[in-house]
Amino acid sequence: MQSNDPNYLPPATVAKAEGFQWDYTAPYYGREDLTPQKRAELDQLVRDAASKIVAAQGQTAVAAAAALKFDQLIVLAMSKADSVNLAILQTDFPAQYDQFKSGAVVDLQPVAQPEALPEMNPLTDAASLAAGAEVFKVNCIPCHNAAGEGGIGPNLTDNYWIHGGKYSQIVNTINIGVPAKGMIAWNRTLKPNQIQEVASFIRTLKGTNPPNPKDPQGTLYEGD
Protein backbone atom coordinates (compact mmCIF):
# COMPACT_ATOMS: atom_id res chain seq x y z
CA MET A 1 0.00 0.00 0.00
CA GLN A 2 2.79 2.40 0.94
CA SER A 3 4.57 2.07 -2.39
CA ASN A 4 1.41 3.09 -4.26
CA ASP A 5 0.90 6.37 -2.40
CA PRO A 6 3.27 9.22 -3.30
CA ASN A 7 2.18 11.04 -0.12
CA TYR A 8 3.24 8.29 2.25
CA LEU A 9 5.74 9.14 4.96
CA PRO A 10 6.80 6.99 7.92
CA PRO A 11 5.16 8.14 11.18
CA ALA A 12 8.32 9.78 12.53
CA THR A 13 8.72 11.83 9.36
CA VAL A 14 5.09 12.87 9.35
CA ALA A 15 5.44 14.27 12.84
CA LYS A 16 8.28 16.58 11.73
CA ALA A 17 6.90 17.54 8.32
CA GLU A 18 6.04 21.20 7.82
CA GLY A 19 4.91 23.33 4.89
CA PHE A 20 2.17 23.25 2.30
CA GLN A 21 3.55 20.18 0.54
CA TRP A 22 2.75 18.08 3.60
CA ASP A 23 -0.89 19.16 3.96
CA TYR A 24 -2.11 15.72 2.94
CA THR A 25 -0.97 12.41 4.31
CA ALA A 26 -2.90 9.17 3.86
CA PRO A 27 -4.50 8.55 7.27
CA TYR A 28 -3.88 4.82 7.50
CA TYR A 29 -0.52 4.14 5.90
CA GLY A 30 1.46 4.82 9.02
CA ARG A 31 1.82 1.54 10.89
CA GLU A 32 0.82 3.30 14.10
CA ASP A 33 -2.43 4.67 12.70
CA LEU A 34 -4.49 1.99 10.92
CA THR A 35 -8.14 2.98 10.64
CA PRO A 36 -10.66 0.34 11.75
CA GLN A 37 -11.70 -0.24 8.13
CA LYS A 38 -8.17 -0.78 6.90
CA ARG A 39 -7.29 -2.94 9.88
CA ALA A 40 -10.33 -5.10 9.05
CA GLU A 41 -9.21 -5.32 5.42
CA LEU A 42 -5.68 -6.25 6.47
CA ASP A 43 -7.09 -8.77 8.92
CA GLN A 44 -9.02 -10.45 6.10
CA LEU A 45 -5.97 -10.48 3.85
CA VAL A 46 -3.93 -12.16 6.56
CA ARG A 47 -6.71 -14.68 7.17
CA ASP A 48 -6.78 -15.53 3.48
CA ALA A 49 -3.02 -15.95 3.45
CA ALA A 50 -3.10 -18.09 6.58
CA SER A 51 -5.74 -20.33 5.04
CA LYS A 52 -3.49 -20.89 2.03
CA ILE A 53 -0.51 -21.56 4.28
CA VAL A 54 -2.27 -24.29 6.22
CA ALA A 55 -4.38 -25.70 3.37
CA ALA A 56 -2.04 -28.67 3.08
CA GLN A 57 -2.88 -29.57 6.67
CA GLY A 58 -6.49 -30.30 5.74
CA GLN A 59 -9.93 -28.79 5.85
CA THR A 60 -10.16 -28.62 9.65
CA ALA A 61 -6.87 -26.73 9.86
CA VAL A 62 -8.19 -24.07 7.50
CA ALA A 63 -11.32 -23.77 9.60
CA ALA A 64 -9.16 -23.39 12.69
CA ALA A 65 -7.14 -20.63 11.04
CA ALA A 66 -10.33 -18.73 10.33
CA ALA A 67 -11.05 -18.62 14.07
CA LEU A 68 -7.71 -17.11 15.07
CA LYS A 69 -7.29 -13.55 16.27
CA PHE A 70 -5.30 -11.00 14.25
CA ASP A 71 -2.14 -11.21 16.37
CA GLN A 72 -2.25 -15.00 16.27
CA LEU A 73 -2.53 -14.96 12.49
CA ILE A 74 0.57 -12.77 12.22
CA VAL A 75 2.53 -15.09 14.51
CA LEU A 76 1.29 -18.07 12.49
CA ALA A 77 2.45 -16.41 9.28
CA MET A 78 5.86 -15.74 10.86
CA SER A 79 6.20 -19.37 11.90
CA LYS A 80 5.62 -20.46 8.29
CA ALA A 81 7.61 -17.70 6.54
CA ASP A 82 11.02 -18.00 4.92
CA SER A 83 13.83 -15.65 5.98
CA VAL A 84 12.94 -12.96 3.41
CA ASN A 85 9.27 -12.80 4.27
CA LEU A 86 9.99 -13.08 7.97
CA ALA A 87 12.13 -9.94 7.73
CA ILE A 88 9.24 -8.11 6.05
CA LEU A 89 6.81 -9.26 8.72
CA GLN A 90 9.25 -8.22 11.45
CA THR A 91 9.41 -4.70 10.02
CA ASP A 92 5.66 -4.34 9.60
CA PHE A 93 4.57 -6.07 12.81
CA PRO A 94 7.27 -5.55 15.47
CA ALA A 95 4.97 -6.31 18.42
CA GLN A 96 3.87 -9.60 16.94
CA TYR A 97 7.49 -10.39 16.05
CA ASP A 98 8.40 -10.01 19.73
CA GLN A 99 5.69 -12.56 20.53
CA PHE A 100 7.08 -14.86 17.86
CA LYS A 101 10.66 -14.56 19.18
CA SER A 102 9.47 -15.17 22.73
CA GLY A 103 8.35 -18.60 21.64
CA ALA A 104 4.64 -18.00 21.16
CA VAL A 105 3.10 -20.95 19.36
CA VAL A 106 -0.14 -20.91 17.42
CA ASP A 107 -1.61 -24.38 17.48
CA LEU A 108 -4.18 -25.17 14.81
CA GLN A 109 -6.44 -27.46 16.76
CA PRO A 110 -9.04 -29.03 14.46
CA VAL A 111 -12.42 -27.36 14.69
CA ALA A 112 -15.14 -29.78 15.65
CA GLN A 113 -17.33 -30.40 12.63
CA PRO A 114 -21.12 -30.27 13.05
CA GLU A 115 -22.79 -33.64 13.16
CA ALA A 116 -24.09 -34.82 9.82
CA LEU A 117 -27.84 -35.02 9.40
CA PRO A 118 -29.25 -38.57 9.52
CA GLU A 119 -30.26 -40.59 6.47
CA MET A 120 -33.47 -39.26 4.92
CA ASN A 121 -35.54 -39.30 1.78
CA PRO A 122 -35.77 -36.35 -0.63
CA LEU A 123 -38.84 -34.16 -0.51
CA THR A 124 -41.01 -34.27 -3.61
CA ASP A 125 -44.10 -32.21 -2.84
CA ALA A 126 -44.55 -28.94 -4.71
CA ALA A 127 -44.52 -26.76 -1.59
CA SER A 128 -41.19 -28.13 -0.36
CA LEU A 129 -39.56 -27.82 -3.79
CA ALA A 130 -40.82 -24.25 -4.14
CA ALA A 131 -39.39 -23.43 -0.71
CA GLY A 132 -36.10 -25.05 -1.72
CA ALA A 133 -36.01 -23.02 -4.93
CA GLU A 134 -36.36 -19.85 -2.87
CA VAL A 135 -33.53 -20.87 -0.54
CA PHE A 136 -31.40 -21.61 -3.60
CA LYS A 137 -32.23 -18.23 -5.13
CA VAL A 138 -31.26 -16.32 -2.00
CA ASN A 139 -28.18 -18.27 -0.94
CA CYS A 140 -26.77 -20.49 -3.70
CA ILE A 141 -26.92 -18.45 -6.92
CA PRO A 142 -23.77 -16.39 -6.15
CA CYS A 143 -21.60 -19.52 -6.42
CA HIS A 144 -23.64 -21.94 -8.53
CA ASN A 145 -25.46 -19.43 -10.79
CA ALA A 146 -29.17 -19.09 -11.45
CA ALA A 147 -29.74 -22.37 -13.28
CA GLY A 148 -27.25 -24.35 -11.22
CA GLU A 149 -24.82 -24.46 -14.14
CA GLY A 150 -21.88 -23.65 -11.89
CA GLY A 151 -19.58 -20.68 -11.48
CA ILE A 152 -17.35 -20.34 -8.46
CA GLY A 153 -18.95 -23.56 -7.28
CA PRO A 154 -19.50 -26.75 -9.29
CA ASN A 155 -22.20 -27.50 -11.84
CA LEU A 156 -25.24 -28.97 -10.07
CA THR A 157 -27.06 -30.13 -13.20
CA ASP A 158 -24.81 -32.98 -14.35
CA ASN A 159 -24.18 -36.41 -12.84
CA TYR A 160 -20.81 -35.58 -11.30
CA TRP A 161 -20.40 -34.80 -7.62
CA ILE A 162 -17.33 -33.83 -5.62
CA HIS A 163 -18.78 -34.85 -2.25
CA GLY A 164 -21.34 -37.42 -3.35
CA GLY A 165 -24.59 -37.18 -5.28
CA LYS A 166 -26.76 -39.21 -2.95
CA TYR A 167 -29.49 -37.09 -1.34
CA SER A 168 -28.11 -37.57 2.16
CA GLN A 169 -24.64 -36.60 0.90
CA ILE A 170 -25.98 -33.41 -0.68
CA VAL A 171 -27.74 -32.57 2.58
CA ASN A 172 -24.54 -33.30 4.51
CA THR A 173 -22.42 -31.09 2.24
CA ILE A 174 -24.83 -28.18 2.66
CA ASN A 175 -25.03 -28.85 6.37
CA ILE A 176 -21.30 -28.85 7.23
CA GLY A 177 -19.99 -26.92 4.22
CA VAL A 178 -16.59 -27.18 2.56
CA PRO A 179 -14.48 -24.49 4.32
CA ALA A 180 -11.35 -25.34 2.33
CA LYS A 181 -13.22 -24.33 -0.85
CA GLY A 182 -14.98 -21.31 0.63
CA MET A 183 -18.38 -22.95 1.20
CA ILE A 184 -19.70 -22.16 4.66
CA ALA A 185 -21.54 -24.58 6.93
CA TRP A 186 -25.10 -23.58 6.12
CA ASN A 187 -26.48 -25.14 9.30
CA ARG A 188 -25.51 -21.86 10.98
CA THR A 189 -27.84 -19.95 8.67
CA LEU A 190 -30.51 -22.36 7.49
CA LYS A 191 -32.89 -24.49 9.51
CA PRO A 192 -32.77 -28.29 9.05
CA ASN A 193 -35.98 -28.27 7.02
CA GLN A 194 -34.58 -25.55 4.74
CA ILE A 195 -31.45 -27.62 4.12
CA GLN A 196 -33.61 -30.59 3.20
CA GLU A 197 -35.78 -28.44 0.94
CA VAL A 198 -32.89 -26.88 -0.96
CA ALA A 199 -31.15 -30.27 -1.29
CA SER A 200 -34.37 -31.69 -2.72
CA PHE A 201 -34.63 -28.80 -5.15
CA ILE A 202 -31.02 -29.26 -6.25
CA ARG A 203 -31.82 -32.85 -7.20
CA THR A 204 -34.46 -31.56 -9.64
CA LEU A 205 -31.75 -29.66 -11.55
CA LYS A 206 -30.17 -32.90 -12.79
CA GLY A 207 -30.36 -33.16 -16.57
CA THR A 208 -31.80 -29.68 -17.14
CA ASN A 209 -28.90 -28.84 -19.48
CA PRO A 210 -28.63 -25.07 -18.90
CA PRO A 211 -26.53 -22.95 -21.27
CA ASN A 212 -22.82 -22.53 -20.55
CA PRO A 213 -22.51 -25.31 -17.97
CA LYS A 214 -19.31 -25.65 -16.01
CA ASP A 215 -17.22 -28.71 -16.86
CA PRO A 216 -17.92 -31.80 -14.75
CA GLN A 217 -16.08 -32.10 -11.45
CA GLY A 218 -15.81 -35.01 -9.09
CA THR A 219 -17.06 -38.56 -9.54
CA LEU A 220 -19.89 -39.85 -11.71
CA TYR A 221 -22.96 -40.66 -9.61
CA GLU A 222 -25.24 -43.19 -11.24
CA GLY A 223 -27.93 -43.33 -8.59
CA ASP A 224 -31.41 -41.90 -8.84
Image (spheres, grey):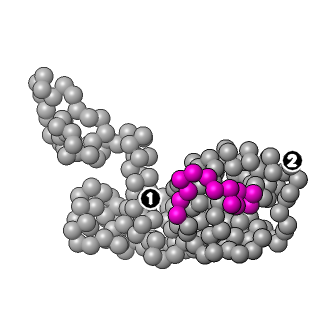
Tell me which amino acid carries mark 1.
Arg
| Foreground residue among 117 and 106 | 117
Mark linked to residue 47 = 1
What is the magenta segment's predominant secondary structure? loop
197 sits left or right of 145 in the view: right
Q: Which residue is tagged 2?
A: 127
135 sits left or right of 212 in the view: right
Q: In the image, residue 85 lies at what x, y percent?
A: 25, 66
Q: In the image, residue 152 lies at what x, y percent?
A: 52, 56
Residue at image x 59%, y 60%?
155
Residue 126 visible in the snapshot:
yes
Residue at image x 56%, y 67%?
216
| Foreground residue among 151 and 39 | 151
Residue at image x 35%, y 72%?
79
Circle 1 packing at 10 Å, graded few (<14), some (14-19), many (20+), is: many
Mark 1 vs mark 2, CA separation in Å: 41 Å
In the image, residue 134 sits, relative to residue 22, either above or below, namely: below
53 sits left or right of 183 in the view: left
Mark linked to residue 9 = none
Q: Nearer the viewer, mark 1 or mark 2?
A: 2
The quadrant where residue 24 appears: top left
